[in-house]
Amino acid sequence: MFELVKGSDIVISSIFYYGVSQVISYTFRVNGFERELTGKMSGDSDIRGIEFSDSLDELMMFLMPFDASVSKRLRSISWACVDDEVVDFPFVLVWF
């Protein structure tokens, strides 16, 4: 997926939300390489989540041992974008 070395970070360059389909598209950047991964927003006003694509799930599972709150942080920034809150990009998701 990405080659991570000490001093690397995973940055979200952009997020696009497609309201009709509820698909959310992330552009991740690591060490100068970019990769687009997607998810689908799910939930209501009480319980809000993201259904990860297989590739996004693979990335989250890879990152969890390094930072257990990475999924929570991704969910938070995703819903902020969906709710039209101001999000400053690039956004550092994980530091190594």
Image (cartoon, helix red, strand yellow):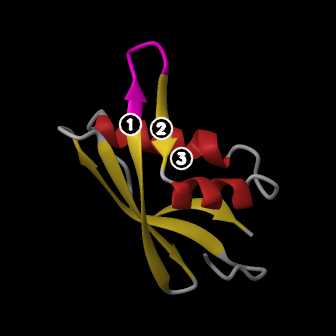
First in sequence, mark 3 or 1: give its number: 1
Q: Which residue lies furthest to the bottom in this view?
A: 32
The residue tagged 2 is 50
Using the image as rendered, state which of residue 29 and residue 57 is in the foreground: 57
Question: Would residue 85 be visible to someone looking at this image?
Answer: no
Label disc, if present, on residue 41 of the rendered structure: 1
Label disc, if present, on residue 74 of the rendered structure: 3
Q: Quadrant of the N terminus?
A: bottom right
Residue 29's place in the image compared with 65, above or below, is below
> Which structural element holds mark 2?
strand
Tags 1 and 2 touching, CB below 8 Å: yes
Tags 2 and 3 touching, CB below 8 Å: yes
Q: Quadrant of residue 10?
A: bottom right
Q: Label 3 is placed on what type of residue?
A: Leu
Q: Give the range drawn in magenta.
A: 41-47
Within 10 Å of disc 1 (Cα), the crowding (few <14, some 14-19, many 20+) is many
> Which structural element holds mark 3?
helix
Q: Which residue lies furthest to the front in this view?
A: 54
Whole-percent x, y for residue 42 in the image:
40, 30
Q: Residue furthest left?
A: 20
Distance, label 1 to label 2, CA atoms, is 5 Å
Distance, label 3 to label 1, CA atoms, is 12 Å
Residue 8's place in the image compared with 59, above or below, is below
Q: Label 2 is placed on what type of residue?
A: Ile
First in sequence, mark 1 or 2: give its number: 1
Residue 10 belongs to magenta span? no
Q: Label 1 is placed on what type of residue?
A: Met
